[in-house]
Image (tube, rainbow, N blue to C red):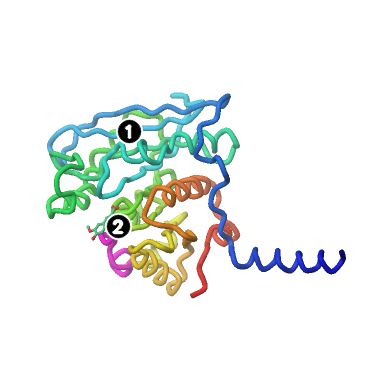
């Protein structure tokens, strides 16, 4: 009996070591619960001087939302085949976030789900990989900075400073988040790339001024599934941050593909870190760097 106990203790230690710090998400985290307070999803329409017409975005206001409070904002971006409804339809962020609020694991925030394809016809139809449609994902930087953020800050009770703005997204939206977030560190302090796509700038272009970035960034989150064909874009960014001693989370999802299973888990984990003090032990807890 004693020997069995010792053996299972050793086995347990190995299991823990081999799963590293991987936290993932608990069973049921994305299943709607009854009897909890719910946030609200609305559509907003804003005027885009960048595109030259009106554009749509979804907005999630948290449980207990009140216009007499002031909230930080997460801008959450979709992928190449999506639009402002992609997260809502496939990722159910409102369910994940409502559950996190019920468990008191998240700071109250507003989440904006924009359309990151900044062109007149921004629907995900036809050949989504064709030049102008991919270019529109780069054009979105101007729409976000000059049109959408000012609209949100004029019309919603939000905190209007760098440390209260976060930018994250999946795939093309992950590339956008790294590009625009790290490229505009006076605007964003919290930056997350989930399975970032080939639109991700080279690490040197992303962060030419390491010293300034270290000063301004609250959280840099880089994550990708280990089975995702695009992992090199995350890995090279992580390698650069490591080499330059820029504090960041690098979370490689075990058995993770290029899909919403990974992105929902990313939202679950990333959102819990937002707008709270970030400690080295939290960074360590969420970093899951595979041994090669
Ligand atoms: C590419 C492969 C994937 C690419 C974009 C993607 C622009 C984006 C994937 C996604 O958003 O899911 O070569 O080029």
Is 282 placed above or below 162 here? below
Whether residue 151 is visible to the viewer of this picture, yes or no, is yes
Q: Looking at the image, is mark 2 or mark 1 earlier in the sequence?
A: 1
Residue with the most extreme right position: 2
Image quarter (top left, top right, bottom left or bottom right) of the N terminus: bottom right
Q: Quadrant of ligand 1?
A: bottom left
- What residue is pinned by disc 1? 58
Labelled disc at residue 278: none
- Tell me which residue sits at (37%, 61%) in the image: 228
What percent of the width, then of the height, locates residue 206? Answer: 31, 63
Q: Residue at x 54, y 57 (%)?
A: 286
Magenta span: 197-207
> Residue 115 placed where, x, y %?
26, 40
Q: Is residue 109 magenta?
A: no
Place residue 282 in its image quadrant.
Answer: bottom right
Residue ID for mark 2: 179
Residue 156: % across, % down: 37, 29
Secondary element under disc 2, as helix, strand or loop, is helix
Observer-side mark, 2 or 1, equals: 1
Whether label 2 touches label 1, CB < 8 Å: no
Can residue 222 be seen in this snapshot?
A: no
Neighbour tally class for label 2: few under 14, some 14-19, many 20 plus, Cα within 10 Å: many
- Predominant SS of the magenta segment: loop
Element class at badge 1:
strand
**Left-right relation of 52 to 91:** left
Q: How many marks?
A: 2
**75 w.r.t. 245: above or below:** above
Tell me the distance, in whole angstroms, between the alpha carbons under discs 2 and 1.
22 Å
Q: Is residue 95 left or right of residue 88?
A: right
Is the residue marked by circle 1 packed among few (<14), some (14-19), or many (20+) residues within 10 Å? Answer: many
- Is 201 part of what is drawn in magenta? yes
């Amino acid at each position: 009996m004693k020997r069995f106990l010792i053996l299972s203790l050793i086995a347990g230690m190995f299991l823990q070591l081999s799963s590293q710090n991987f936290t993932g998400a608990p069973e049921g985290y994305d299943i709607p619960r009854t009897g909890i307070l719910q946030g609200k999803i609305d559509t907003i329409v804003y005027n885009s001087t960048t595109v030259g017409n009106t554009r749509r975005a979804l907005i999630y206001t948290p449980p207990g939302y009140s216009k007499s409070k002031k909230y930080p904002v997460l801008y959450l971006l979709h992928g190449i085949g999506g639009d402002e409804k992609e997260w809502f339809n496939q990722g159910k962020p409102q369910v994940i976030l409502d559950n996190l609020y019920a468990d008191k694991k998240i700071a109250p925030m507003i989440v904006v789900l924009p359309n990151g394809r900044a062109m007149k016809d921004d629907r995900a139809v036809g050949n989504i990989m064709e030049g102008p449609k991919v270019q529109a994902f780069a054009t979105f930087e101007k729409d976000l900075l000059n049109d959408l953020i000012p609209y949100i800050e004029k019309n919603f009770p939000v905190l209007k400073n760098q440390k209260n703005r976060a930018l994250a997204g999946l795939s093309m939206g992950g590339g956008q988040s790294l590009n625009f977030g790290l490229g505009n560190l006076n605007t964003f302090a919290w930056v997350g790339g989930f399975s970032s796509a080939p639109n991700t700038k080279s690490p040197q272009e992303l962060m030419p001024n390491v010293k300034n970035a270290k000063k301004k960034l609250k959280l840099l989150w880089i994550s990708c599934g280990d089975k995702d064909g695009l992992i090199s874009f995350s890995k090279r960014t992580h390698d650069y941050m490591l080499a330059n001693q820029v504090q960041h989370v690098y979370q490689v999802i075990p058995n993770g593909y290029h899909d919403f299973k990974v992105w929902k888990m990313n939202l679950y984990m990333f959102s819990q870190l937002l707008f709270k003090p970030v400690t080295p032990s939290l960074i360590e807890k969420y970093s899951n760097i595979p041994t090669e």
